[in-house]
Image (tube, helix red, strand yellow):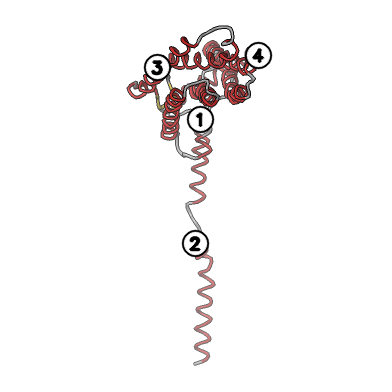
């Protein structure tokens, strides 16, 4: 009986030993590596565009300048603040011209250019309101519209981003996914807002010699009206935001690459 029990125990031990490699194989996640490979492959197939162009660099410099302009104004360095604001306005004119003239348009440029304007407007609106140079009700109206448009931009970027949707890919603006086309009234509103902010920034310098308060009040109410109108225009304008198809994405990448190759060829001559 003891021998039989011992033999039976050896059989069970041998079966357990024989099955242990199979258990290890079965316990693994068989789809982990294939899924990782597929994900890497999809990322390699996703087209990228060259975002390091002169217009985009100018636009980024405007983004960087925005907080310094606000800081200088709050600390009553009005001349420096106005000068840096003039630089920001100049880059806003020049970057678009260069992009069109030398065919350096990029999808990311259509996003960060209005973004730079909004960052500049937001920072200066807050700073001017804090200093009492801009009415609080007007500052609230301007900021409320921009917050709404910002949330809409986040949403459209997410739904238009090609798979896989990851945090890193979301912020990789070399992956084009959607284009923003400002409406006509939005362009007018941006120009009027910049004029108002610029005039308000310059007010401490020129108000000592010229009484421009009636004109400033009229400009403030005009900006309030165009701010409401331009915000509503994005709701009823169909082409304000365009989600790119794969074919359109490839076309823009090819166009950017051709422009880069042409520039490199001209530099070698």
Q: Earlier in the sequence, mark 2 or mark 3?
A: 2
Say whether marks 2 and 4 touch (CB < 8 Å): no
Q: Earlier in the sequence, mark 2 or mark 4?
A: 2
Furthest residue in direction top, as rendered = 210
Furthest residue in direction right, as rendered = 268
In the image, residue 127 lies at what x, y percent? 55, 25
Q: Residues within 10 Å of mark 3 (few under 14, many from 20)?
A: some
Instruction: Tell me the CA gap for discs 3 and 1.
Output: 33 Å
Question: Helix, strand, or loop for circle 3?
Answer: helix
- Mark number, residue 175: 1
Instruction: Tell me the CA gap for discs 2 and 4.
Output: 59 Å
Q: Quadrant of residue 150?
A: top left
Say whether marks 3 and 1 touch (CB < 8 Å): no
Furthest residue in direction left, as rendered = 236
Q: Residues within 10 Å of mark 4 (few under 14, many from 20)?
A: few
Residue found at x 51% / y 79%? 11
Figure check: 234 above or below 8: above
Instruction: Tell me the CA gap for discs 1 and 2.
Output: 38 Å
- Circle 4 is placed at which residue position? 267
Please identify, in this view, whether the residue under mark 4 or under mark 1 is nearer the observer: 1
Figure check: 26 above or below 71: below
């Amino acid at each position: 009986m003891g021998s039989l029990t011992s033999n039976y125990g050896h059989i069970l031990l041998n079966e357990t030993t024989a099955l242990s490699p199979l258990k290890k194989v079965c316990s693994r996640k068989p789809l982990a590596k294939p899924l990782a490979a597929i994900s890497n492959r999809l990322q390699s197939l996703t087209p990228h565009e060259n975002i390091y162009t002169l217009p985009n660099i100018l636009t980024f410099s405007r983004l960087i300048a925005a907080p310094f302009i606000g800081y200088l104004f709050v600390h009553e360095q009005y001349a420096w603040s106005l000068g840096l604001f003039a630089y920001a306005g100049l880059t806003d004119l020049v970057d678009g011209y260069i992009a069109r003239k030398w065919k350096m348009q990029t999808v990311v440029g259509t996003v960060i250019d209005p973004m730079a304007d909004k960052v500049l407007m937001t920072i200066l609106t807050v700073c001017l309101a804090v200093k009492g140079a801009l009415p609080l009700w007007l500052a609230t109206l301007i900021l409320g519209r921009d917050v709404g448009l910002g949330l809409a931009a986040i949403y459209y970027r997410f739904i238009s981003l090609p798979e896989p949707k990851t945090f890193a890919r979301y912020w990789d603006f070399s992956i084009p996914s959607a284009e923003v086309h400002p409406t006509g009234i939005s362009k007018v509103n941006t120009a009027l807002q910049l004029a108002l902010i610029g005039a308000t920034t310059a007010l401490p310098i020129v108000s000592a010699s010229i009484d421009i308060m009636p004109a400033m009040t009229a400009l403030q109410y005009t900006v309030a009206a165009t701010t409401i109108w331009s915000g509503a225009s994005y709701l009823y304008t169909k082409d304000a935001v365009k989600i790119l198809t794969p074919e359109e994405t490839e076309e823009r990448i090819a166009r950017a690459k051709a422009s880069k190759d042409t520039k490199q060829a001209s530099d070698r001559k």
